[in-house]
């Protein structure tokens, strides 16, 4: 009796069972997990299918043992094998995967400096980002942080919606959306920037226990690290601070005491001479294992050679002229894209640096005992050092120094380290802001500071700035694109369709 009723309702039960199973799968898909609701719907669907099968057991038996069933079982077996192959490929790809950034500027890849910093992480860092789900910056930050976690297992990332979890936001003291908190033990660093420079800088700051000081000398019209004018060094200061340095100024005419946290002193383009006591303070600092970067412009009237000659180098009183290798044809702005290997330039191969109005650096015979002198940037063989700085028209003559000439050099003698640059314009605001990361001037300066501060692990090429590419179209070109995509292509599809219909008619 029961079987007859089931047989009568078998088709209905089968359709209802299939519908319930489909509804259960869709519910699980939308909920993102197999909760009790999708599970109950699937269970009801399975019961309905079993009931439908019990109503017509003979038809079910024939369906399972007939020719169609054999063909169907072959198809099922092939499908299962295909699924197994796909699962195996995904399993292997998940454990042995690689990535390729095919953009010309590698804009979706982290810089070598960031990767080096991530590899040097010794302790885990937790990143908690407080974003509203409606904030479009959240998706960009998620992609960027995924790149970071790809290179290290020391980072953990959590996104928190302050509206959904106000207790967590209060616990962290969050008052603004977009706050990103970096934690290492008891140390904490907050940032609002979502670009690579901001993230890497925050990781660097929270991972270090100390902050080294970089002091620019003042009192002789040097480049001002606080100056935002074209000749200021505020852009360089910002880069140094992102590398976790504390940047300050020091006037040796006011005090001869070098701050205890000094990692390096910088003499950046002075225009008036230093007093003998100031030069003596510098000499004493270097003799004690100090680190000094000197940037001197041509005809500045500043002479620090009495301090530098102890280490086998000095600045020439000339103006470098390079017709063969110059910046956009300006022979007074030599450039280079090839660097001898050194810790400062090891990652700069192929990166162009240029030096507006530079003077050259001279070695004084054999290097002093224990000193190592390395030329970092040199000019071409066709260059020369113009010694007549009063004439308006430069011309190579017998009194000039023939090329190649040294523009940047590093010296190491024991613990003492020196970097000499025959130009201070190369790191000024107007130069760095005009090239916007397209050239290597900023990297060369920061790498030199990292070497002086004995932070060799930070020496690399820093994060890239965004590469904005704009396409400019004339009104006629814009109309052509609009009409061809909105009218011509649909009209062609419609015409072909009508033609096929006409031929089959």
Image: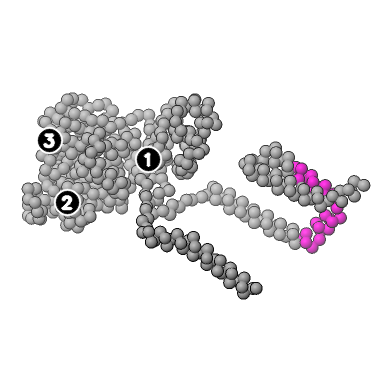
Which residue, given by chain and number where applicable, does mark 3 sit on?
A: 272
Closer to the camera in the image, 107 or 121:
107
- Residue at figure coordinates x 27%, y 52% from the top left: 337
Q: Residues within 10 Å of mark 1 (few under 14, many from 20)?
A: many
Residue 304 to residue 11: above or below? above
- Residue at figure coordinates x 34%, y 34% from the top left: 244
Residue 259 to residue 495: above or below? above
In three-dimensional space, the C-alpha distance between marks 1 and 3, rounded to whole angstroms, equals 36 Å
- Where residue 81 sits, quadrant-wise, is bottom right
Q: Does residue 396 appear in this view?
A: yes
Closer to the camera in the image, 229 or 409:
229
Which residue, given by chain and number where applicable, does mark 1 sit on?
A: 197
- Where residue 307 sits, quadrant-wise, is top left
Q: Nearer the N terminus, badge 3 or badge 2? A: 3
Q: Position of residue 200 (x, y in %)?
A: 39, 38
Which residues make up the magenta segment?
A: 43-70
Q: Is residue 151 left or right of residue 389?
A: right
Which residue, given by chain and number where applicable, does mark 2 sit on?
A: 332
């Amino acid at each position: 009796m029961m079987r007859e009723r089931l047989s009568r309702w078998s088709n209905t039960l089968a359709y209802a069972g299939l519908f319930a199973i489909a509804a259960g799968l869709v519910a699980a898909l939308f909920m993102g997990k197999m909760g009790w609701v999708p599970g109950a719907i699937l269970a009801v669907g399975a019961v309905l299918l079993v009931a439908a099968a019990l109503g017509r057991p003979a038809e079910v038996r024939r369906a399972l043992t007939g020719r169609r069933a054999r063909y169907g079982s072959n198809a099922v077996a092939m499908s299962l094998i295909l699924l197994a192959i796909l699962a195996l490929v995904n399993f292997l790809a998940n454990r042995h995967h690689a990535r390729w950034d095919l953009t010309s500027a590698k804009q979706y890849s982290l810089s070598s400096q960031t990767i080096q910093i991530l590899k040097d992480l010794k302790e885990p860092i937790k990143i908690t980002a407080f974003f509203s789900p409606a904030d479009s910056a959240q998706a960009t930050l998620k992609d960027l942080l995924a790149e970071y976690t790809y290179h290290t297992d020391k980072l953990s990332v959590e996104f928190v919606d302050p509206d959904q979890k106000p207790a967590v936001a209060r616990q962290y003291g969050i008052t603004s959306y977009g706050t990103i908190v970096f934690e290492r033990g008891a140390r904490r660093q907050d940032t609002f920037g979502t670009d690579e420079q901001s993230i890497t800088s925050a990781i660097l700051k929270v991972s270090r226990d100390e902050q080294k000081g970089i002091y620019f000398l003042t009192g002789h019209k040097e480049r001002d690290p606080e100056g935002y004018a074209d000749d200021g060094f505020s852009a360089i200061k910002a880069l140094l601070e992102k590398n976790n340095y504390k940047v300050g100024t020091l006037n040796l005419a006011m005090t001869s005491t070098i701050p205890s946290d000094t990692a390096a002193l910088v003499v950046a383009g002075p225009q008036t001479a230093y007093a003998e006591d100031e030069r003596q303070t510098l000499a004493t600092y270097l003799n004690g294992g100090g680190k000094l970067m000197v940037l001197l412009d041509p005809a500045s009237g500043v002479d620090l050679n009495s301090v530098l000659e102890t280490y086998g180098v000095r600045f020439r009183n000339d103006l470098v002229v390079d017709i063969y290798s110059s910046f956009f044809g300006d022979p007074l702005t030599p450039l280079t894209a090839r660097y001898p290997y050194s810790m400062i330039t090891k990652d700069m191969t192929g990166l162009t640096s240029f030096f507006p109005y530079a003077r050259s650096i001279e070695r004084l015979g054999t290097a002093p005992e224990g000193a190592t002198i390395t030329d970092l940037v040199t000019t071409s063989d066709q260059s020369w050092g113009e010694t007549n700085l009063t004439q308006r028209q430069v011309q190579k003559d017998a009194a000039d120094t023939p090329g190649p000439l040294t523009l940047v050099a590093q010296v190491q003698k024991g613990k003492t380290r020196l970097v000499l640059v025959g130009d201070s314009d190369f790191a000024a605001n107007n130069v760095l802001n005009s090239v916007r990361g397209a050239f290597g001037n900023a990297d060369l300066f920061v790498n030199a500071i990292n070497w002086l501060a004995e932070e060799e692990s930070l020496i690399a090429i820093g994060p890239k700035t965004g590469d904005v590419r704009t396409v400019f179209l004339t009104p006629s070109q814009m109309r052509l694109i609009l009409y061809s995509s909105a009218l011509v292509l649909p009209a062609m599809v419609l015409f072909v369709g009508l033609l096929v219909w006409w031929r089959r008619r």
